[in-house]
Amino acid sequence: MRECTGRIREYTGGDMTRFETSRLVQDAVIRNLQRITESSQRLSGEIKGTQAQVPWRELAGFRNVIVQNVAQ
């Protein structure tokens, strides 16, 4: 998950314009977001409990949004 986050930062350079203007960057970021959300679903409840500030349920829901929109 950290690796994917780092890749997203690398691809965008922290610049929303770079994301908005490059289909390649958009695809790369979306793929890494998908990997993050899928990985989060495989974490144990014990691990999730150590990061209570993370909205785990919403993250799982976001995965569904990504998959549905990419498939269209």
Image (cartoon, rainbow, N blue to C red):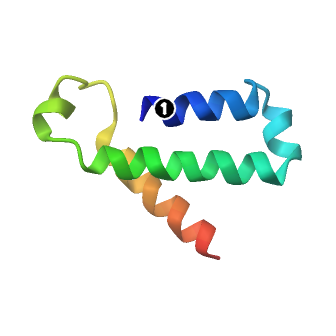
The picture quadrant where one finds residue 1 is top left
Residue 14: x and y, percent?
73, 24
Reply above or below: 72 against 21: below
Q: Residue at x 58, y 53 (%)?
A: 31
Side of 52 relative to 39 (left or right): left
Relative to the observer, which residue lies in front, 67 or 9? 9
Residue 24: x and y, percent?
79, 51
The picture quadrant where one finds residue 49 is top left
Relative to the observer, which residue lies in front, 16 or 9? 9
Reply above or below: 48 against 38: above
Q: Residue at x 86, y 34 (%)?
A: 17
Reply above or below: 8 against 67: above
- Label tally: 1
**Residue farthest along the left direction in this orientation:** 46
Residue 51: x and y, percent?
25, 24
Q: Residues within 10 Å of mark 1 (few under 14, many from 20)?
A: few
What residue is pinned by disc 1? 3
**Residue farthest along the bottom direction in this orientation:** 72
Q: Amino acid at mark 1?
A: Glu
Residue 27: x and y, percent?
70, 54
Q: Residue at x 24, y 49 (%)?
A: 42
Q: Quadrant of the C terminus?
A: bottom right
Side of 39 relative to 31 (left or right): left
